[in-house]
Amino acid sequence: MSLSVGIIRTRYLGDVILLVPLIREIRAFDPEARIGVVLNAGTTYPLERLPGVSLLPMATSGSIRRLSSTLFLAREVRRSRFDLLFDLTVSDRSRLISRLSGAGRTGAAGAAADRRAGGPWEIYLPVDLNVGPEPVTVQHGKLFRALGIPVSGRGDKAYPPDPRWTEEADRFLGRTFPGGRPVLFLHPGGRHWFKRWPPDRFARLADRWIARTGGGVVVAGSASERTLVESVLSGTVGTEIIPLVGAPIGLLDALIRRATVFVGSDSGPLHMADAAHVPLVGLFGSTSPAVWGPTASSRREVVYRSLPCSPCDHTGCSYGEKNCLASLPVEEVYDRVERLLS
């Protein structure tokens, strides 16, 4: 009889991409496994076309909607009758879902400080997602092994794109950069301001790319990052630079797959590029590349600028404008880009 496995990972887009290696290893262990994933609404794209995976999106806004969504998902998880349930979030909402799940066996992986007496799990595995030193997927893989699924966490994190967005990306690039010119894809965003390389550096990197390759540049950000994208564009002198703000995740993914080189900080788009084996330069300071860095692309460069407080707990930054990534010069990043072009 095939396994029925539930996973709770209500975090961000990059965290969902980092589930893919674990899901692939579960399916390798049991090709008929039925897998259900509780995840935040808006982060489903990487898992939508994986076979044998059902998605249970959770509302992220409005206290009433969040409570209603949590109770609904707790009921759906219970109906699923999972043999195994893995909580990789460890929050008040995930505790409630785990407690009401009725799963055969349950486990959680979270910070040691988040462990509470009387928790709803059979096994609680303390993990350190700041210092590591192992990649997050490997740390989570230990929990799966503890509950009987022999995964390593080092599996392939590639996921299939949506063909509709692939066609749209081809049309977009054909209109924007005709003739097959090389494209530099820049993502200046990040969940915290101190995870971001300054926008003026991205602007100078874009100008250098255009001057040396004759190619084009796409600068992408979410709708809330419009000002950041505009700050990059305002610092450039080149004309072959296109903003991409608030694009659907499928289009963002498809365009990243067609980039000649991707440059960005620790964020969802960086993991998109890595999963698609796009040549990339990852910029790290407040997070450890040993834990959150790219692992899949055969052509990847990682720049890590650390201070005595790196990696940090992301509650703020006392260094202000002298934060870790502020010390990273354009020349060093472009040297890494040129390595990928050689």
Image: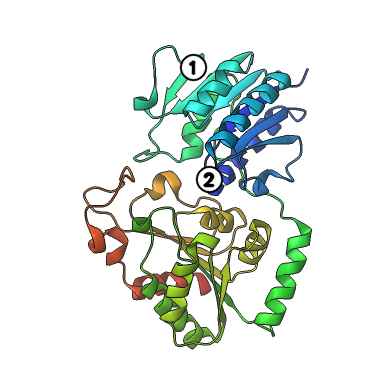
Residue 152 location, x and y as percent?
A: 55, 33
Numbered tag placed on residue 151 in the rendering = none
Q: How many marks?
A: 2
Residue drawn where x is 42% and y is 69% of the image: 336
Q: Name above or below for residue 75 compared with residue 69.
A: above
Q: Quadrant of the image for the N terminus?
A: top right
Residue drawn where x is 29% and y is 49% of the image: 316
Q: Name above or below for residue 181 compared with residue 220.
A: below
Label 2 neighbour load within 10 Å: few <14, some 14-19, many 20+ = some
Residue lying farthest front? 64
Residue type, numbered disc 1 = Ile
Residue drawn where x is 78% and y is 61% of the image: 164
Q: Which residue is mark 2?
A: 12
Rendered image quadrant of residue 33: top right
Q: Are marks 1 and 2 in contact (CB under 8 Å)?
A: no
**In this view of the protein, which residue sits in the foreground, 199 or 24?**
199
Q: Mark yes or no: residue 87 visible.
A: yes
Residue type, numbered disc 2 = Tyr
**Horizontally, is 83 left or right of 270 in the view?**
right
Q: Mark yes or no: residue 180 visible.
A: no
Label 1 neighbour load within 10 Å: few <14, some 14-19, many 20+ = some
Q: Earlier in the sequence, mark 1 or mark 2?
A: 2
Residue 131 location, x and y as percent?
A: 34, 40
Numbered tag placed on residue 123 in the rendering = 1
Residue 153 location, x and y as percent?
A: 54, 36
Mark 1 residue element: strand
**Between tags 1 and 2, which lies in front?**
2
Residue 275 location, x and y as percent?
A: 60, 53
Q: Name above or below for residue 143 compared with residue 234.
A: above
**In this view of the protein, which residue sits in the foreground, 251 or 325?**
251
Gap between marks 1 and 2, in whole Å? 24 Å
